[in-house]
Image: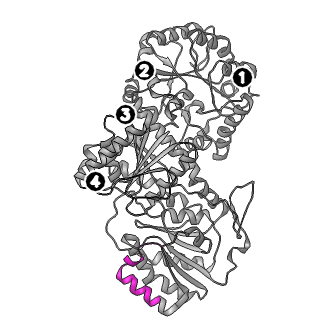
Amino acid sequence: MRILHVLSANFFAGSVAYAVALAKAHHREGHQVWLASDAAALPTVAAQVQLPISQRTYGQRLRNIRALRQLVRQHGIDVVHAHSRAASWVSYFALRGLGVPLVSTIHGRQHLHTSTSLFDIYGQKVIAICENLAEHLREEVKMAPAKIVVVPNGIKWEVEVKNEEVKTAAEGAAIFTSSFFTSTFLRLAFIGRFNGPKGERAAALLQHVFPALLQEFAQLRVALIGGELEQLPEAGKMALAQLQSQYGERVEVIGFTDDVAGWLRKTDLVIGAGRVAMEALGQGRAVLALGEALYAGPVSLASYPAAAASNFGDISAWQQPAAGFDPAPVLADARAFLARPHRVAPALAQRVRHDYDLARVAARVLGVYESARMALAAPAFMPVLMYHKIPEAPIATRHQIFVTKENFAKHLAYFKDQKLTPITFQDYQDFASGRRPLAEFPRRPIVLTFDDGYTDNYTNLLPLMQQYGYRGVLYLLGDFEVRYNQWDLAQDPTEPRADIMSETQKRAFVAAGWEIGAHTLTHPRLASLPAAEAAHEIAASKAELERRLGITIVSFAYPYGDLSPETKRLAADAGFTYAVATDTGGLHLEDDRMQIFRINMFPHESASSLFKKTAPWYRRYYRWKRKK
């Protein structure tokens, strides 16, 4: 993919580091990357173009728009990624009429401007770096929820094992030995900027927290690490001078450093927010999450979700009333830690390393690029139909999840007559990723899916589909020892038994070019299972199908359409690119790839019902009719 990042880079802010890191990660995977920014030279492997993006005079904006438009055309850019409001503004107008998608990452709360309501300047997809920011965009900015994706900043964790760390192959996480606290002193570090709201926080700590701690704990050193130290509020400068005079070398004024990771390894307690908090936790350092928006407190396994939602104190979901910062809770929490220094739980360090891993984040951002491409290239509702059994004759069952061979043949004839083109999710992914040109994407695509893998799929379905030259998606169980619909009989012994295909029969679908998807190991209701069991059912089904059939699995089907936010997360974590639901989901596939709206097909579908269920307006009609 050819990716253009556009950013304001008149100083090396966190958004610049984020763009540079993504560019490096995607370049390493073989993508072509360009960076257009104020800076003449950034530490990046991407091709660089200097443009004064941060200059907002209308004359300069117009020149930026023209330059970006020429750049996009010249290099055949596939997606533009903007990293500031100024970058989104010029990118939006530069891309008008070009058919190239725009993705914007938003790093902080947005001021409402006239252009925000008049134009959709942020593009097809918006990346919010934390949950609080996503809520702000939905509720206060009134941005369409379907276009917002929460993806955090990414961190490339150091591979080397440090002296105080040992890694176990089983856990793959940093485990800290008893030698963690072996120094003759403890170090508390405030790491962040010293201007704006964070400067005010630092000044309050210098006045009301650090003096008490330095007096109470003789082995304590306090370090101040970060840029713009000269912009510290005057009260903070006076308090700092007093502390330096009284405590000498126990007060360490480091200022800006490009070795934050090194200082973290020499620090026992970190006060900070955003990326600082993430890196500290990933290294096993205790953190008091204090940002410009709020104090999230000590970060533990229990408090981690709430702290991460605020980007560790930097972002509130709602506009906060003006109020003074109370440093008393910070003093109490720091005092409690220094009285009994302790390590971050290895499970927390492992989770942070997982959640903020740069490779994982870069892969998710690439998925957002693909989603934006398809949202622009194929904006209409794409019907995804759900079938199960294809028997010779009607089945006496209360579960109306069959279509007879005769009726299914009529369905296929209807699809052909209406010039509907069956594709698979793997086909769709090939278009989204650029492996196939979007010019070849069908005018009227449809996805035909079949759950469970019944024997009549082999005897009746496969020959019919081959007769029309069609391929579909077959969702199979990962446990090949499941040979009949035992989940149905467990609920109702009077249900007729329906046999599952043999491995040889399943391989016939692979040979015919069908996509095979996963459908758990044993067909449970995932949302009712403990998280660990649900995770195993999902991930193991993918692994086993790939092993037994020698294929790559990209899509998943929730049994019974039973899902929850947690099961969706587990499906994404297992490596699925798409997951299909049953009669729930967004108006468009790209609204939520982990909950794709799938239409149930019944025994007595008529020409009118087939017309309705394959029509572009059907999803809106269904939402209106069912109120969902």
Pointer 3 or 1: first along the chain: 3
Residue 484 - label: 1
Residue 379 occupies quadrant: top left
How far across and down, in percent of the image, does residue 621 sit?
37, 25
Q: Amino acid at mark 3?
A: Gly
Observer-side mark, 2 or 3, equals 3
Label 1 secondary element: loop
Pointer 2 or 4: first along the chain: 4
Is 238 inside the magenta-drawn segment? Answer: yes
Pointer 4 or 1: first along the chain: 4
Q: Quadrant of the C terminus?
A: top left
Q: Amino acid at mark 2?
A: Arg
Q: Are marks 2 and 4 in contact (CB under 8 Å)?
A: no
How far across and down, in percent of the image, does residue 43 sit?
50, 59
Q: Which residue is mark 3?
A: 99
Crowdedness of circle 4 by 10 Å Cα count: few (<14), some, many (20+)? Answer: few
Residue interval drawn in magenta: 226-243
Q: Amino acid at mark 4?
A: Leu
Cα separation, mark 3 vs mark 4, equals 27 Å
What residue do we see at 37% from left, 62% from top? 10
Residue 443 - label: 2
Q: Which residue is mark 4?
A: 112
Rendered view: 553 above or below 601: below
Colour mapping: one colour
Q: Are marks 3 and 1 in contact (CB under 8 Å)?
A: no
Left or right, residue 515 beside residue 56: right
How far across and down, in percent of the image, does residue 582 sit?
52, 29
Q: Nearer the viewer, residue 32 or 287?
A: 32
Crowdedness of circle 3 by 10 Å Cα count: few (<14), some, many (20+)? Answer: few
Label 4 secondary element: loop
Observer-side mark, 3 or 1, equals 3
